[in-house]
Image (cartoon, rainbow, N blue to C red):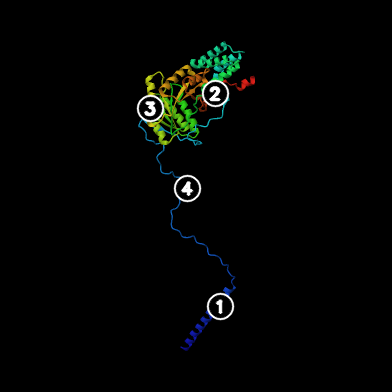
Amino acid sequence: MTIVAIIVALIVVVAAVTLFLARGQSGVAQQLQPPQPNLPRPLQPPRVASTPAPPSPRESARPAPTQPSPHSVEVAPESIIESTPAAAAPTAAPDAPPAAAHRDIAGLRRGLAAIRGGFVAKLSALFRGSKEIDPALLEQVEEVMLACDVGPKTTTAILQRLRESVERDRLRDPEAVWAALRVEARRILSIGGGPIRITSNPTVVLMVGVNGVGKTTTIGKLATRYVSSGKSVVLAAGDTFRAAAVQQLEVWGKRVGATVVKGKEAADPGAVAFDATNVARSRGADLLLVDTAGRLHTKVPLMDEIKKVAKTIAKAMEGAPHETLLVLDATTGQNALTQAAMFKDALGLTGIVLTKLDGTAKGGIVLGICDELKVPVRYIGLGERAEDLREFDAEDFVEALFGKGDEEVAAA
């Protein structure tokens, strides 16, 4: 037992010495290691409440739920609305007409070339061939004016004033008479007018005239002018008698971006005009142009029908139509004056649109209408393009008609 005890004691002593030596080596190793830099602990992202993930690009590109179209307006069952969004256009003051182009006398003179080569050329030839004023000269002037559709009443009035000036010795040579004629023309034509002005929302314009004068085309050209100046335009296809007129107006509407209100085949034109007025009012449109069927001014039932259309528009909007424009074909001469007189009696015209003025060598009807009826010419048509419908300006018109062109100045 003693031997066993001695062995156990030795084992314990050896284990204790071994443990002591191991701890000492560990401390020496720690002292020999190089010092470590004091690095900051990496920041951990703060813990936040869970939120829905943002939509992916594909989800963002999805269209919003469909909303009712602003063009889906409830109207009478027989009326149909077609609209095309207009291209972005510069805005203008609510009551301002489209900005007028700079004075283009040369372009206007080219458009009036047929009249200058006919009516004006005949007059100027008389004065070039005379060296003094005598009764024969004034009689020849009268003949030319009558032949060129100035009209007997207007011609007589102009010649009477010229004769009085000659007798008072105010006109001493043919050049003075020529200048006096220009003054007379300017006086007759300067009776107001100007382009359509936006005076309310909408400003309603009723377009009337006989068959074939170019009402629908004129409406399309006017729509082009006003849409391009930033105005919203509604077109009423009130010519329900001629199917081609509705289609033609639809083409213009799509071309310029104007809303078109039309009726079913053979619909009542007054109902279409009524619905179009309500549509234009509900949308806050600037301008409503109402097309109507061509009608002979001598047909009483047809003239009564157009009166009814005007009254129906007035029921839809107090004070409307704000403008009633008569479209006349300049090539019809004195017949155009008769048309204007009868339409004026029926409706109370606010202006004349004289189309196809580039297609006549007479053109004196412009003076006759303004002088006898006191209705201003508002627009003149000098070609097929939309820009060929020009605002009428008396000063520019007289200068282009009676003034010398560049070629004449060069030859002088």
Nearer to me, 340 or 235: 340
Residue type (three-letter) at the residue carrying disc 4: Pro
Q: Nearer the viewer, residue 208 or 236?
A: 208
> Does the residue at mark 1 contact the one at mark 2 (Cβ under 8 Å)?
no
> What numbered label is drawn on residue 311?
3
The residues tagged by marks 4 and 2 sit, at their Cα atoms, a distance apart of 61 Å
Question: What separation in Å lies between label 1 and label 2 (alpha carbons)?
Answer: 121 Å
Task: Please determine whether, in this image, residue 26 is positioned above or below residue 149.
Answer: below
Point out the tag, 1 or 3, that comes first from the N-terminus: 1
Indicate which label's residue lies in the foreground, 3 or 4: 3
Q: Earlier in the sequence, mark 4 or mark 1?
A: 1
Asked if the residue under mark 3 is in contact with the one under mark 1, i.e. CB atoms within 8 Å, the reply is no
Front tag of 4 and 2: 2
Please give the residue where the numbered disc 2 appears in the rendered image: 397
**Amino acid beneath label 1:** Gly
Q: Quadrant of residue 346?
A: top left
Residue tagged by mark 4?
57
Q: Is residue 60 above or below residue 146?
A: below
